[in-house]
Amino acid sequence: MSGTDWTKAKVSRKHSSTNFQAIGADGLIWQTGLSTKLKTIKFSSSNAEHIIDSKGRGKMHFFKLILLITAISFLSYFLTTTIVDVALMGRLNFCFSAKAKTKEFLITKANRIDFQDGFKCSGFSSAFVMRHWNISADGNSAYGKMPNKMRGGYVYPKGIFNFLSKNGFKVKYCRGNLNSLKNAVATGNPVIAMIKIRPDKHWLHYVPVVGYDGQNIFVAESLAELSNCNEPHYNRRIPAKEFKKLWNTAMPKMPLYANTFFTVER
């Protein structure tokens, strides 16, 4: 039966115990014997295309369903994580600036830089800011009164916010960019930034930022091993590119909490 287009064949079955006829697209009649009750069957290429198309649509619907489930799961995780982060770490204010108002700035008001031990950077950075506002404070005492501590002694950002607020300061917890950080420092008041101790580790650390120029960020560092200079108003100089890496503290469990800092006013 070579040459017969069976996708366009018209198959005719009758009440017969012997005859089976197929009329091909080429007009030839093909016959064989059967011993069963026959029915008329029509089969065309459009039927085959319909079956194939139905299977294709089924696969497409399946992939769409998988994508929808994935999107819902991601959104649910993101919302749940954000709610928990806000409860533990505090509410963020989004503060972005298109450009820095000044190319360089340095806070030159007299202040001392103390070195910490343990996980007391929250207390030492807060005490530095308090001394800037002419309030006598030391890091150990401030850390002892710091709320919102973890089991290991590290303090959530919410702890710094609550501590300074209770001491009469107007505190704003921000997420921004390098220009907004520079503009906050350029008001003449140190800001407290949350950074990583090392770019490849998620060990978080609070530092008072006191100035900047075209290439560097100037910090009053409370970890002696990270101090790399001995200037009158700062003891750590961080290249801006490196600072950006350290400042990117986002993690799966805290996706929004990167590039954050506290502004503190009296």
Image (cartoon, grey):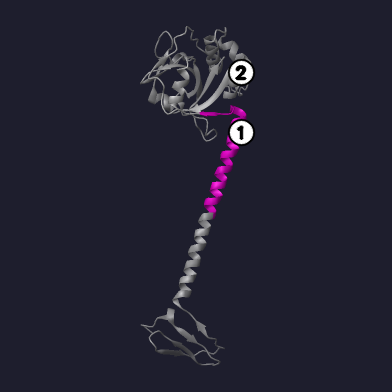
Percent coordinates x, y for residue 31 in the rendering: 45, 90
C-alpha distance separating marks 2 and 1: 22 Å
User: Which residue is under mark 1?
Assistant: 84
The residue singled out by tag 2 in the image is 165
Tag 1 secondary structure: helix
Question: SS for tag 2?
Answer: helix
Residue 215 falls left or right of residue 81: left
Q: Write the residue at 52% across / 51% down.
A: 67
Q: Point out the frontmost of discs 2 and 1.
A: 2
Query: Which of the pair 252/165 is nearer the observer?
Result: 165
Q: Tell me where the magenta segment starts and ends, as one range.
A: 65-94
36 or 242: nearer the viewer: 242
Q: Earlier in the sequence, mark 2 or mark 1?
A: 1
Residue 224, position as x, y percentages in the image: 46, 13
- Majority SS type along the magenta span: helix
At x 52%, y 10%, the residue is: 132
Q: Residues within 10 Å of mark 1 (few under 14, many from 20)?
A: some
Check the image and report above or below for 67 versus 52. above
